[in-house]
C-alpha cells in the first residue's frame, strides 16, 4: 500500500518519471483518474467510464500480453470503488424550500472502457504513463497504433453503426441523434464516414495532450489538431478554422491559419472562414475529406 501511495503522489505531481510501468501502477493510475474525473450534479455524481492509457512504446510492448487481464482487473477495481462509494450515499441537507434531505449516488456514464495507446510524443520516455478519462462513446477502430478498445460489461449489439462509421459524440444506440453534417474520407486505416452531431469538432491525429473528436491514422504532416469545424446553432451555417502546421484547404483554396507563433509561443487568433454546404477539405496534401451538410435550421 505504501508503494501504491508513493506512486499515486508521483503520478499526480509528475515529479518522478517511472522507470517502467507495472500492471498494478497502471490500474492505480486509472483509479486516481476515476476520482479526479467525477462530475458532481444535484442528485447524482457522474463517473466517467472511458479510460485511455497512453504508454511509452517499450511499456506498451511489454504489457501487450497482459492487456486483456489488466482490462478485467481495472474494470473490477473500478466497479468495487463505485460500489464502495454507493454503499453509503452522501446525504445532502435540505434547502429551505425542500421538504426532505436528498441522497447523492455515483453513476457511471456507461460500461467500463479501457483503451491502450502508444505515446509517440518527443518526451514520452519521461512521461511513460498518462491516463485520460471521458464519458463519450469512442470511435470503433483504434487510431493511435494501440490495441482495439474493449468495453467491459454487458452491451447491446449496435445495429446503427457500420464498420466504416465513426460517430464518437453520442451513444450509437441513440437513433434520434440529429446529424448536422458528414465527413467522408480515407486514411491509413481505410475508408470511413464520420457523422457530425454537435456544434464544434476538432479533426487531426490526436495525442495524450491533444483531444480531437475525429482521430486520423496518417502521416505526421497532418497535425495532432489540424482543423476545427464549427456550426452556428442560430443560422445552421458552418465555419472552419485551420490549426495546423502544414495547412488546410477548401476546394483548392488555402484556409488562413488561425495559429500564430511568436517567440516559440503559439496563440490562437480565432480566424475562421465559412465552410460551404458541400466541399472538399484537404489536410497538408495528405488526406482529402468530403464535407456535406445534412441539416439546415
Image (cartoon, rainbow, N blue to C red):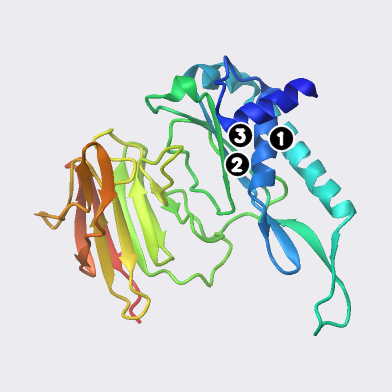
| Quadrant including the N terminus | top right
Label 3 environment density (alpha carbons within 10 Å; few <14, some 14–19, many ≥20): few
User: Where does residue 60 sit, x and y in percent of width and height?
Assistant: 53, 22
Q: Which sits earlier in the primary sequence, circle 1 or circle 3?
A: 3
SS at mark 2 in the image: strand
Q: Are marks 1 and 3 in contact (CB under 8 Å)?
A: no
* Residue 17 visible in image: yes
Residue count near mark 2 (Cα–Cα under 10 Å), binned few <14, some 14–19, many ≥20: many
Q: Earlier in the sequence, mark 2 or mark 3?
A: 3
Residue 34 lies, with reference to residue 144, above or below; the image says below
Q: Position of residue 71 (x, y in %)?
A: 67, 33
For the residues labelled 2 and 1, the Cα–Cα distance comes to 10 Å
Q: Which residue is mark 2?
A: 51
- What residue does disc 3 label? 12
Find numbered disc 1 in the image and state the secondary structure of the residue it sits on: helix
Q: Which residue is at 35% across, 40% downward? A: 205
- Residues 182 and 32: in front is 32
Q: Are marks 2 and 1 in contact (CB under 8 Å)?
A: yes
Which residue, as the protein is rendered here, is positioned at the far bottom? 97
Q: Residue at x 13, y 58 (%)?
A: 251
Quadrant that contains the C terminus: bottom left
Relative placement, left or right, of 8 versus 167 is right
**In the image, which disc is placed on residue 74?**
1
Q: Earlier in the sequence, mark 2 or mark 1?
A: 2
Q: Nearer the viewer, mark 2 or mark 3?
A: 3
Q: Position of residue 4 (x, y in %)?
A: 74, 25
Amino acid at each position: 500500500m505504501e508503494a501504491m501511495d508513493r506512486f499515486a503522489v508521483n503520478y499526480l505531481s509528475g515529479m518522478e518519471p517511472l522507470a517502467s510501468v507495472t500492471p498494478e501502477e497502471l490500474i492505480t493510475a486509472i483509479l486516481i483518474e476515476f476520482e479526479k474525473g467525477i462530475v458532481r450534479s444535484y442528485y447524482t455524481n457522474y463517473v466517467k467510464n472511458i479510460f485511455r492509457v497512453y504508454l511509452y512504446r517499450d511499456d506498451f510492448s511489454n504489457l501487450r500480453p497482459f492487456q486483456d487481464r489488466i482490462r478485467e482487473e481495472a474494470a473490477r477495481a473500478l466497479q468495487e470503488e463505485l460500489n464502495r462509494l454507493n454503499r453509503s450515499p452522501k446525504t445532502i441537507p435540505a434547502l429551505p424550500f425542500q421538504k426532505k434531505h436528498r441522497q447523492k449516488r455515483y453513476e457511471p456514464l456507461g460500461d467500463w472502457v479501457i483503451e491502450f495507446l502508444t505515446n509517440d510524443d518527443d518526451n514520452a520516455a519521461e512521461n511513460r504513463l498518462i491516463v485520460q478519462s471521458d464519458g463519450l462513446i469512442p470511435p470503433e477502430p483504434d487510431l493511435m497504433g494501440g490495441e482495439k478498445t474493449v468495453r467491459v460489461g454487458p452491451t447491446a449489439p449496435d445495429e446503427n453503426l457500420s464498420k466504416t462509421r465513426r460517430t464518437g459524440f453520442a451513444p450509437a444506440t441513440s437513433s434520434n441523434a440529429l446529424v448536422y453534417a458528414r465527413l467522408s474520407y480515407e486514411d491509413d486505416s481505410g475508408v470511413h464516414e464520420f457523422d457530425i452531431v454537435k456544434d464544434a469538432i476538432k479533426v487531426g491525429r490526436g495525442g495524450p495532450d491533444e483531444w480531437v473528436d475525429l482521430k486520423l491514422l496518417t502521416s505526421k504532416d497532418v497535425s495532432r489538431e489540424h482543423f476545427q469545424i464549427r456550426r452556428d446553432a442560430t443560422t445552421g451555417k458552418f465555419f472552419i478554422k485551420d490549426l495546423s502546421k502544414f495547412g488546410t484547404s477548401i476546394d483548392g483554396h488555402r484556409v488562413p491559419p488561425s495559429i500564430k507563433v511568436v517567440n516559440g509561443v503559439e496563440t490562437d487568433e480565432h480566424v475562421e472562414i465559412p465552410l460551404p454546404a458541400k466541399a472538399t477539405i484537404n489536410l497538408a496534401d495528405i488526406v482529402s475529406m468530403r464535407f456535406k451538410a445534412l441539416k439546415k435550421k
